[in-house]
Amino acid sequence: MGVENPAEQAQVLLRTRLCNPNFIFNMFSDSPDSNYSKLKYIMSSSVTEACNNSALLLGPRGCGKVATLEMVIKDLLQEYPDMICVIKLNGLLHSEDNCALKEIARQLCIENQLVFSKMASFDDNSQFVMAMLRECGLAHKTIIFVLDEFDLFTQGKQRLLYSLLDAMQSVTSQAVVVGVSCRLDADQLLEKRVRSRFSHRKLLFLPPSQEDLQKILQHALLLPMESGLPPQHVAAYNKKLLDTLSDDKFKDIIESLCNSDSTFNHLLRFLFSAVCQMDTKSGFLSLDNFKTALSSIQRHPKLEALQDCSILELYILVCLRRLEVKEQETTNFNSVMKEYKSVHDSVQTTDYYARNVCLRAFEHLLQRQLISLVDNRAHSQSVEFRPVRLLISSHELHQGLKSYRSCPAILHKLLDRGV
Amino acid sequence: MSEEGNPVTPKRTTRASLSCTPNPEKVKSCKQQPLTLHDLAYGDESISLDDLISSLPGRRAQINELLRLLGPLDSPMYPVFVYGGASTGKTSSILQIFKHLKRPFVYCSCITCYSPRILFESVLNQLLLHRRNESNRYSSTKRCERPSDFVNHLQEALRNVVDSLKVRSSSKKSVLGKMVYLVFDNLELAREWDKASIILPFLFKLYDILKMPEVGLIFLSNASPDTYYSDTGYVEPLPVYFPDYTEDELRQILMKNQENPKLYSSFLEVVLRPFCRVTRRVDELSNAFSSLYQIYVEPLDDLGILPSEDMKRKLFSHLQPHIGPSLNDTFKVESRLSSEASAKTNKRKGIAKKIGVCESSDEIDFHMSACAKYLLICAFLASRNPATLDASLFDSTGGSNNRKRKRKSSEKSIERKETAEQELLLKGPGTFPLERLLAIFQCIVSVSECLPDEEAQGDGGLEGESWTNGLMSDVLLELSSLCNANFISKGGSCPLEGANRYRSMVSEAMALKVARSLKFPLAKYLYRGLT
């Protein structure tokens, strides 16, 4: 790499940090009442006292459930080497019992340097897993099962969950089952026989508070002195950053960001986007960077799609809206065309096009998802006859028309007048 | 499966780059030698940033934004979601950017990889530098159907690639860097897949699942991120928006690669504005303009001429009568074409066929047997008319003009008729059982037998009743071929009767055309008249 532009180097450093969730959640590991310490207590007790345990980590997406769990596991692996074996499953990948069991067997084989047979049947695998559980229990080795997207494992007969939790009822085994889910009612999804075997320890992960936010911002963005970057650059950068962070305008930005979504992940994406905007010449993060990052993250896809429409497509949307105001029960292309014609008859516009052209514009709208077909079942009918509905509100349509560069004034009138 | 014979070259062309000069050397070289890591990136030819931006007019802001998100060499990135309407240069921009950056990447489009398995295998083939050819019987390296297998293979493959990239970048100054990028194009199509509820969240979460900072994910889609519904959600990628081109940008794009820019720009001055009101898609506009331009330059002998003001005016007046009609039939040539324009239909037919059933000019463009034509008309009638009126419409006297006139007189019935018309517009053509179709067919054929100068195409020698009886088996055959051609759709069976129900899919204009070719008085038999 060599000594390059310090600004670029700093940018790479910041990007690496922001893309690594463990870095961010490290700062919460020291406080005693954090989820980190609770989880660590549960899991380490299972390792030291040779008992079985189960826990659920619940909370909205992007609040650091998996990151915290990974940190705990990493620490435990360091503290108790050779006493822990981690099996990771993901509901998106292994929600099927057969597949999940195979994956468990595969990971167990890798951990213990055994030969994994792809041909093993469900029965073979389940016997193998049970035997491994027993053996590991006898050897005082704890197996940690991490079930990400736990709610997806509850689909179907829950055989996997049952056999895992049932095996943990015996004295000989030594295992921890940790489920991670963004559904707060994940434990209610369990069958009765599974639920009764579950320990009902639940840890709730919440979006960060205001103080935490401030801490994260500094933690993530301040450059360290001992990173090989030129110290005067680091000092200047940090000073500028602290100035920016204490700016009132910056606080407004953060507030509007958190109003829509206040999870860690959202914040990190915002910071990442801001770091990407960083000027590589000066190498400082300015308030403008954060502003552009905010606007690039908070997008209004429907309004954007409206800006992309041609005039004819806008006419069709306005006609649809007028039909909506008239409280017609179902609308389809033909009724829109009727309205379009009547609009044209009442006010002579230059934008009157043939049915074919309108149909194509209508299909464009469908593609843009500004309108959608009401039901997707009736495939025997052609598009003209299938009922559609508008996917944008009248407010959005108003706003979109207003910001459209060369919107014909007649469209506003048609929309306002209603009938 | 078969469309990805060679994983490197054919897939990395976009519509925009296809029009540019292809590099034959590269194609040849990669057919012979085994693939190396360098083949994951674009080869020797590279383009500067200025070339990159000037090659894609109107996309400067988007390219800069993408470059910023991709960052300097070896910097990790969040997944990026690029979206924007059709033909706004998303794919070309991404590919050109990688050409500029020369970083290794894997490109997969959900159009060619139309199922999860093919998508997974295509990614793995490219990463494992595997080329499907005759010697390996066009098979993939790994067979994986499930996302779980894919993740395992992918992790392994990526680790190998990243490791060798690392070795490379540490040993000698290599431009490749340590990052590998996966590009998934046309993601909106994946929403229609069978297991979309699993695959889409999986793809969006792939970055978290892989836990490899050396992997960059880029999704391209022409649907905005809010249309990817999922019941428990996922962490969204960073959005990058490609807006549709504005009029000025369209002009810049269309001016590219023109032989006579002055002449073309004077042409665009005339046509671009009105066409922009209808559509702003480059592909549609360039199609429409290519035929219009031919008309525009028709009076000129020398295409290299520099147009003077006077000539422009002349050319404009020559073109003007064509603008209005072609505005209304871009891509779909309509029946009310002026006579001189219909001479041009041959040229436009290619365009028309692209869009759908082509209904150009007064003639039907395809051959159909008389029996099929009659069937088509019968189906049309059966779909439009209420079944209860069949008896009165097709009674022995033939036609029911008198009765219809009587009914028209009362105001109430007119009202009723209007609501019924409304209903027809909303509901579309109705369904009918096979028996009704056959009954109408028999009535119509027997009526038209009586008409003079009918059946010039043979079959005329036979007597009415026997003729239809003889045709009966053929009728069913014709019906099934009409169904296959989607003129008549075969719906699900009715729960009460158990028999299949049919529905006519042809438009009124089409039915009229068919009727005209048979000299059949269609209007007489339509209960609600023609709209």
Image: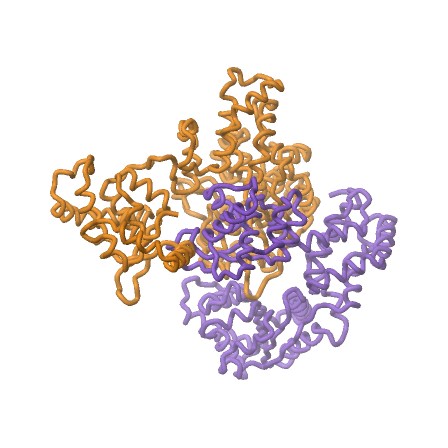
Chain colours: A purple, B orange
Residue B528 point in image, percent of width and height:
35, 52
Residue A159 versus residue B285 in the image, above or below: below
Residue A171 point in image, percent of width and height:
54, 84
Q: Residue at x 41, y 33 (%)?
A: B349
Q: Is residue B436 left or right of residue B335?
A: left
Pick the front one: A239 or B360: B360
Q: Is residue A414 left or right of residue B65?
A: left
Pick the front one: A191 or B103: A191
Residue B197 point in image, percent of width and height:
50, 61
Would you say residue A229 is visible in this rendering? yes
Pick the front one: A106 or A183: A183
Residue B426 versus residue A28 in the image, above or below: above
Q: Residue at x 71, y 65 (%)?
A: A262
Residue B131 point in image, percent of width and height:
47, 42
Q: Is residue B426 left or right of residue B50?
A: left
Residue B449 versus residue A50 in the image, above or below: above
Q: Residue at x 45, y 74 (%)?
A: A157
- Examine the image and state in which quarter residue A55 appears: bottom right
